[in-house]
Each structure stands twice: as C-alpha cells, then as structure tokens.
Image (tube, rainbow, N blue to C red):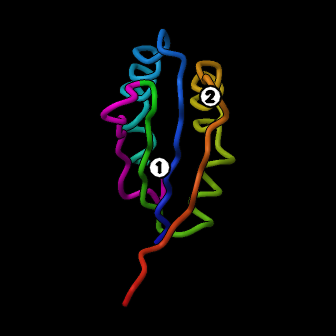
Amino acid sequence: MIKRIVKMRFHAQHVDAFKEIFRLNWHLIKNFEGCSHVELLQDENQPEIFFTYSLWESEAHLNHYRNSELFARVWKSTRALFAEKAQAWSVKQVEF
C-alpha cells in the first residue's frame, strides 16, 4: 500500500477554481485502478494551502495514474493556479 500526500499552495483568487476542479474529478481519481481512497484537506490557518491524501495498491498503480490522460488533464489545469511548486511524498506507516 502506498500513501501519497501532495501539498499545494494556490493564489488566493484561485482557491475556488481549484476546489471546483477537484470536485469534478475526485470520483474519477478514486475510481482509477489501484486507488482505494482520495481526500482533499485544507489548512486551518492558511486557506490557500491544500493537501491531497490518497491510498494506492502499489507504486505501479500510482505511476500508471501519474502517466494517464486523466492525471495530465487535471494536473495541467491545477498547476496553472499554483502560487508555488507542489510538493509530494509517498509514505508508509511506521510499525513499532
């Protein structure tokens, strides 16, 4: 299982546009082969900062999505609204 976190900062005037892009596409992402969960989180104190949190069956599934037409289309329209470059992490739970 791959847990993916992506941090994005938008220009304040583009926050609503991004939320609409996400609203229109989240079900397509969630139903993409290998994806079992996608959610959008917004920073409590800095409303122009968002995080996506997604769960993928494997890195191969995540990479298949990242190389898809869906990702290219959504990322192109999302990236145009950024105030700074996005950051992304693939993480795993630490067992102890």
- The amino acid at mark 2 is Arg
Q: x, y percentage for residue 30?
A: 39, 47
Instruction: Look at the picture and state if 55 lies above or below 17.
Output: below
Point out the image quarter for the C terminus. bottom left
Amino acid type at mark 1: Phe
Q: In the rendered structure, does residue 19 fall within the stretch colored magenta?
A: no
Residue most extreme to the top:
13
| Relative height, residue 22 to residue 31 (above, below) | above
Q: Is residue 91 left or right of residue 24?
A: right
Circle 2 crowding by C-alpha within 10 Å: few under 14, some 14–19, many from 20 = few
Is 43 covered by the magenta stretch? yes
Q: How far apart are marks 1 and 2 (CA)?
A: 14 Å
Judging depth in this view, the residue of 26 and 88 nearest the camera is 88
Q: Where is residue 59 in the image (x, y as percent from the top left)?
A: 60, 67
- At a point 40% along the width and 19% down the height, the residue shown is 20
Q: Which of 67 and 14 is in front in this view?
A: 14
Residue 4 position, x and y percent, is 50, 57
Residue at the outermost bottom position? 96
Which residue is depicted at the point 44% across and 42% down? 51
Q: Is residue 95 left or right of residue 9?
A: left
Circle 1: is it few (<14), some (14-19), or many (20+) Cα within 10 Å? Answer: some
Compare marks 1 and 2 and give the one earlier in the sequence.
1
Q: What's the magenta region?
A: 33-47
Helix, strand or loop at label 1? It is loop
Q: Residue 73 carries which label?
A: 2
Horizontal side, residue 29 vs residue 63: left or right = left
Tell me how many marks there are: 2
Residue at 42% of width from left, 75% of height from top?
Answer: 93
**Residue positioned most to the left:** 44
